[in-house]
Image: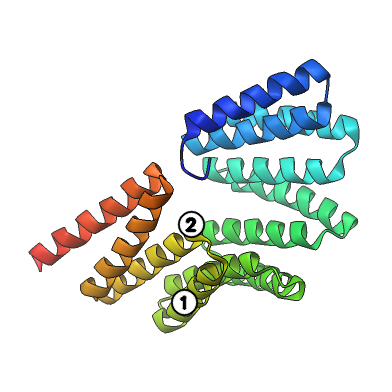
Amino acid sequence: MTRGDLKGAEDMYKKGLAIDEELDRKEGMADAYGNLGIVHATRGDLKSAEDMYKKALVIEEELGRKEGMANAYGNLGILYATRGDLKGAEDMYKKGLAIEEELGRKEGIASQYCSMGNLYLTRGDLKGAEDMYKKGLVIEEEMGRKEGMAREYSNLGIIHATRGDLKSAEDMYKKASAINEELGRKEGMANAYGNLGDLYLTRGDLKSAEETYKKSLAIFTSLGNKMMVRKVKSRIRELKKSKKEG
């Protein structure tokens, strides 16, 4: 899945699902349905993804597994947001958040804050998005979860960049990049370089933009993430076109 090999991921999840069904291991079935939903959603097949997430949710409710229910609500929220159904997405996130708070699962609470922040950002509510990301960051720092901190720094960078505060955005992206490098999280590093490339491009610093895009491309290529390789190559082509036109 991380490599972007959706067919390989789907095959593995289906094999796991078949065994769980044979053993009547409902917990395992719910996990497999959730993972298959992510595969379909990544492909853009939102109808199949929704079916998988709902199957997972039904089982989680049947088992009374609140943690699983919260995950399913979160996945459905992301799906509805992708469809543009922001009201439906918000309802799902709030249901997930309520469960996470009831369970006192700080990691889950931070994740739901992040999702809510993404939703507000899509709506253009930068203040609401910033508030959510900052709440998530406080929890991540409290828990010492560096991966989550890097994610929130990156999100806050997007907020600052959207506002036109490129200096603050650069600071956030660099903080995210430093943590990802420390953790050896190649995908996070590649995303951070991509964000910095976008920022330098906005500034008109085409040389720095190209350098950081190439760093991002090299990492995504090494990971075998074909989808992101295509995306970054497209950005580099656009940048080169801008250079020629300039």
In percent of width and height, residue 126 lies at 55, 69
**Alpha-carbon distance for marks 1 and 2?**
15 Å
For label 2, the residue is 187
Residue 45 visible in the shown view: no
For the point 56% across and 25% down, which residue is it?
11
Q: In screen coordinates, is 114 left or right of 174?
A: right
For the point 64% across and 61% down, which residue is it?
114
Q: Secondary structure at mark 2?
A: helix
Residue 174's label in the rendered image is: 1
Which residue is at the far top? 22
| Labels 1 and 2 touching (C-beta < 8 A) | no
Which residue is at the far bottom? 167
| Amino acid identity at mark 1 | Lys
In percent of width and height, residue 51 lies at 65, 26
Q: Residue 35 is drawn in which quadrant? A: top right
| Amino acid identity at mark 2 | Glu
**Disc 1 vs disc 2: which is toward the camera?**
2
Please state, as top left, top right, bottom left or bottom right, where the C terminus lies in the image.
bottom left
- Give 165 or 187, whichever is nearer the viewer: 187
- Relative to 138, residue 193 above or below: above
Residue 137's label in the rendered image is: none
- Relative to 24, residue 143 above or below: below
